[in-house]
Amino acid sequence: QQPVQSPQAVILREGEDAVINCSSSKALYSVHWYRQKHGEAPVFLMILLKGGEQKGHEKISASFNEKKQQSSLYLTASQLSYSGTYFCGEWTDRGSTLGRLYFGRGTQLTVWP
Amino acid sequence: DAGVIQSPRHEVTEMGQEVTLRCKPISGHDYLFWYRQTMMRGLELLIYFNNNVPIDDSGMPEDRFSAKMPNASFSTLKIQPSEPRDSAVYFCASRGTGYEQYFGPGTRLTVT
């Protein structure tokens, strides 16, 4: 039980945009996005609850399509600091805080000057 | 707040030895998670606790792995005996009333 992320890797020039997708085979209650820089721990970016909600963090935003069981992370005008591995996590235990978070394999984003 | 604290940061040991990893969660957080990260398998949840009680240990690889949380401010993950395939980065994370998990810096374990 693990969401599928695509693409596996993205290489960008500073200022370019990117989209990272996360798909699940199960009904989702929420989708969580984390970023992990090389040699560091994952850091929480945002959570999206069911209902097609969109959120933003700096110039990073995300959407959640509950019906399609998909979430997408949008990175606009990428900065060098955006480089890292992005993980989506799916929370399928509807209505309960005791559910576990399943992480995808990650998308490695590299931004070049 | 100091954040999640893990020790040691690096551990190199020989196959067959016992390894103990330690974690201090953020004060007031009542969830604690142990993850293992490798290139092959990504970020895997091994076990998590709620109010010091293990809730889901289905990710623990085998009987060589054990985890305890004797109180709200301390948890251990023990591997006995260790094997080279246990080499990985082990993260501890904690969570409070919200959904955000706060990860510790990790312990890089190398078993030779």
Image: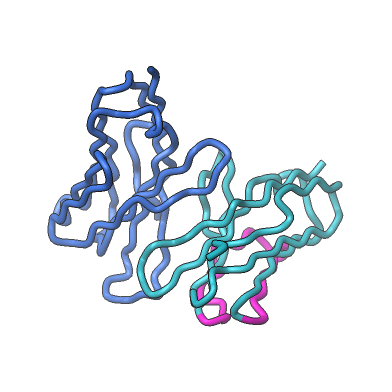
Chain colours: A blue, B cyan
> Where's residue B89, x and y in %?
63, 47
> Where's residue B78, x and y in %?
73, 64
| Frontmost residue, A55 versus B34 | A55
Residue at screen point 18% across, 62% down:
A50
Task: Answer with left or right where residue A43 lies relative to residue B25.
Answer: left
The magenta stretch spans residue A48 = no
Q: Give the magenta range.
A: B51-71
Residue at screen point 32% across, 76% down:
A96
Quadrant where the image shows the C terminus of chain A:
top left
Up the image or down, B43 lies above or below B98; here it is above
Residue at screen point 51% across, 66% down:
B94
Residue at screen point 30% across, 29% down:
A78
Up the image or down, A96 lies above or below B2; here it is below
> Where's residue B31, x and y in %?
49, 73
Quarter of the view holding residue A15 = top left
Quarter of the view holding residue B18 = bottom right
Up the image or down, A91 lies above or below A37; here it is below
